[in-house]
Image (tube, helix red, strand yellow):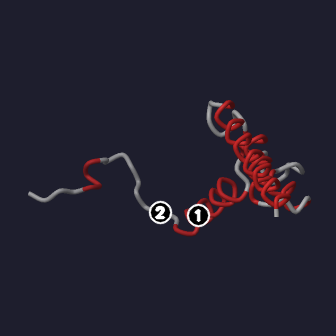
C-alpha cells in the first residue's frame, strides 16, 4: 500500500501558480525584510534606515535610533529595546572618551 499525499487531503487543490507564488514571496520579502511594519513601513518618512542614512550615523548611534523607534513594536518588551538603545549609547560614550584620551 503506497501513501498518497493528495489522498490525505481530498478537498484541497495542491496545484500552484508558480508566478503568483513568486510574486507573493517577493511582496513578503519586500515588506518583512526591506520595510518591516515595526519600523513604520516603506511609506514612513521616519523609518529608521532613512534617519540613519540622512544623518550619516555610525553603527552605535544607528542602533540607538533603531531600538528606540521599534521599542514595544517588534516584541512585547519595550524595556528590552530601550535597554539595548541605552547599551549602544554607552558604547558611543565609551568610544568618544577613548578618542579624547588619545
Which residue lies at the image location 88% right of the left edge and 63% below the top edge? 56
- Outermost residue, bottom direction? 19
Quarter of the picture holding the C terminus = bottom right
From the viewer's perspective, is residue 57 above or below residue 88?
below
Which residue lies at the image location 75% right of the left edge and 54% below the top edge? 60
Residue 92 in percent (x, y) is at 78, 52
- Specify the label residue 20 is tagged with: 1
Q: Do the residues labelled 1 and 2 touch (CB within 8 Å)?
A: yes
Which residue was labeled with disc 2? Answer: 16
Residue 83 in percent (x, y) is at 68, 36
Residue 37 in percent (x, y) is at 72, 45
Which residue lies at the image location 22% right of the left edge and 57% below the top edge? 4
- Specify the label residue 87 is tagged with: none
Question: In the picture provided, is 29 more to the left or to the right than 6?
Answer: right
Q: Nearer the viewer, residue 102 or 89?
A: 102
Secondary structure under the numbered disc 1 in the rendered image: helix
Quarter of the picture holding the N terminus = bottom left
Secondary structure under the numbered disc 2 in the rendered image: loop
Q: Which of 78 and 93 is in front in this view?
A: 93
Residue 10 in percent (x, y) is at 31, 48
Residue 24 lies in quadrant = bottom right
From the viewer's perspective, is residue 83 above or below residue 33?
above
Residue 33 lies in quadrant = bottom right
Amino acid at each position: 500500500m503506497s501513501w498518497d499525499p493528495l489522498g490525505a487531503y481530498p478537498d484541497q487543490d495542491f496545484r500552484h501558480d508558480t508566478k503568483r507564488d513568486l510574486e507573493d514571496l517577493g511582496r513578503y520579502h519586500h515588506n518583512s525584510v526591506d520595510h518591516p511594519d515595526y519600523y513604520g513601513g516603506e511609506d514612513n518618512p521616519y523609518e529608521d534606515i532613512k534617519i540613519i542614512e540622512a544623518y550619516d550615523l555610525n553603527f552605535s548611534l544607528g542602533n540607538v535610533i533603531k531600538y528606540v523607534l521599534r521599542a514595544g513594536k517588534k516584541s512585547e518588551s519595550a524595556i528590552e529595546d530601550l535597554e539595548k538603545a541605552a547599551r549602544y549609547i554607552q558604547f558611543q560614550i565609551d568610544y568618544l572618551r577613548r578618542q579624547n584620551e588619545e
